[in-house]
Image (cartoon, rainbow, N blue to C red):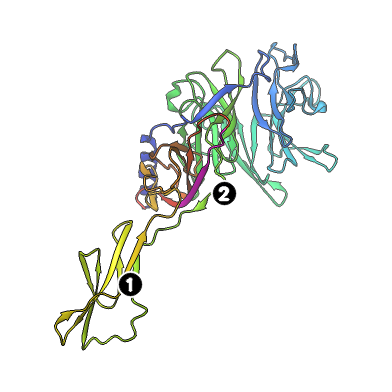
Amino acid sequence: MKRAILAIWTFLVLLLPAVSQDYYKVSKQSRISTGLNEAGAIPFEDGGIVYITESTSVGASSPTDAQGRRLFTIFYMGKNGQKKPFREELVSQKHEGPVSFSGDFNTMVFCQQRPSAGSRVDPLGLYFADRNEAGDWVNERAFEFNSPDAWLFSPSLSQDGRVLYFSANFMDGLGGFDIYRSKLKGGVWSTPENLGPNVNSEGDELYPFIHPSGKLYFSSDGRDDNKAGYDIFETAFMGGVWFEAIKLSTPINSLSDDYQLWFGENFKEGYLTSNRRSRSKEIFEINTDIPEFVAPEPIKKTPFRYQIKDRKLDTVDTNLFRYSWVINDTLELPGHEVIYQFPDTGVYRCELHVFDLQLDTLLDPETVKTLTIRFKEQAVISCPDTITAGVPVEFDGTRTYLPGFDDYSYIWDYGDGSFGQGKQTIHTYYYPGRYKVTLGVQERQQNRRDTPEMKSNFKYVVVIKSGQ
């Protein structure tokens, strides 16, 4: 039964369109570009950028191999634009990089070719180093599974530094380079596991990047029928299964080759390697004009169910009197103490009617209450609490109640790295899980000097597998 459900789920995912990324802006990182190949950009903790380049300095190219091909060097560009080798001791006559860091920047893993006995040069392998209190990189060591018969390339460390993703052309692969995963247990890395056919293909899968959210991004030329060379895909590991990889849409992907992708934790900024504007690989910055949601609050439900009674009523004698409440002169509710679900917001006049059974007459009303029901002043999200993965769902903000906001825009953060704009939007979740959906309502900026006011609220939704 589980296999049948998984098969149905995989089939559904295959039918899904590419993930829309229209809210991103991709622009060339001109300060890094030298006209030679640059790739693999990730941020360092001081705000600089670590990347690999064929240029060891401005105007000077890097070493070449026996066939005359330029080799990469790991470089660093500071916030002031100054460029230099990231680690001088790594600069050699062989290939170095790219690099990945743990979340605290105290562990790094990088690629490098190293000479072995005689004139032999080992294939590209992975190496680790730790940062000491002085900021120096020490305790350099080789990955246990470097092999003389395989190339290990483009590593990506998890935030805690205990899970390593990388690309390699091991003999057990599905073809070309595949993506593998290894876990650090008791100070020892586990045997690398191939991520399988939902991720890997008969072509090459390169540049994995594991996001703190658990999403895995990578580049492949063997999926999507290789229509546009290398493209960026995403997947996630849930319930012991890697889901079928989904191709990202424009502007992340293009008609050219698109390689390494890095996203910040909030998915609002990143780096991309692509040759979309030239024959050489170049580094692009990814940004979005979606604003930050400042201290969003959980959505508060507006109460429509109320108890109506007269606290001043000294005695209640149902033998002598009959009681009822009349709402807006139209609806009569029997009883001196009633519970009523009002249909909507509005102003309601609640009048207590007392009928004297002995005199057979309606007494003059002495109790009249006015009840005003209005929405809480907040950005209101209307959507199902439980959503099926792969099924488009409408997210509605039309019941937002923000008096004083005359002209404003609606901005959505679906909690899965996707954003939307508009009072009503359609979004599809691709992976099961619990997601925090945030709606920000922002006043439109009248002029450049204005700081538009923003109100944001959130709710959680649960996404389940199809057929669950």
For residue 295, which numbered disc appears in the image?
A: 2
| Main secondary structure found in the magenta portion | strand
Label 2 neighbour load within 10 Å: few <14, some 14-19, many 20+: few
Q: Is residue 207 magenta?
A: no
Q: Name which quarter of the figure residue 45 lies in.
A: top right
Q: Report the side of 58 relative to 275 (left or right).
A: right
Instruction: Out of 354 and 205, give the one closest to the viewer.
Output: 354
Disc 2 is placed on an element classified as loop
Q: In terms of sequence position, does the residue under pointer 1 or pointer 2 come before the other?
A: 2
Q: Name the front one of labels 1 and 2.
A: 1
Position of 56 relative to 87 (above/below): above
Q: Report the side of 318 relative to 266 (left or right).
A: left
For residue 246, which numbered disc appears in the image?
A: none
Instruction: Out of 145 and 56, give the one closest to the viewer.
Output: 56
Most extreme residue toward the front is 364
Q: Report the side of 295 relative to 382 (left or right).
A: right
Disc 1: which residue: 308
Label 1 neighbour load within 10 Å: few <14, some 14-19, many 20+: some
- Name the amino acid type tagged 1: Ile
Position of 446 relative to 239 (above/below): above
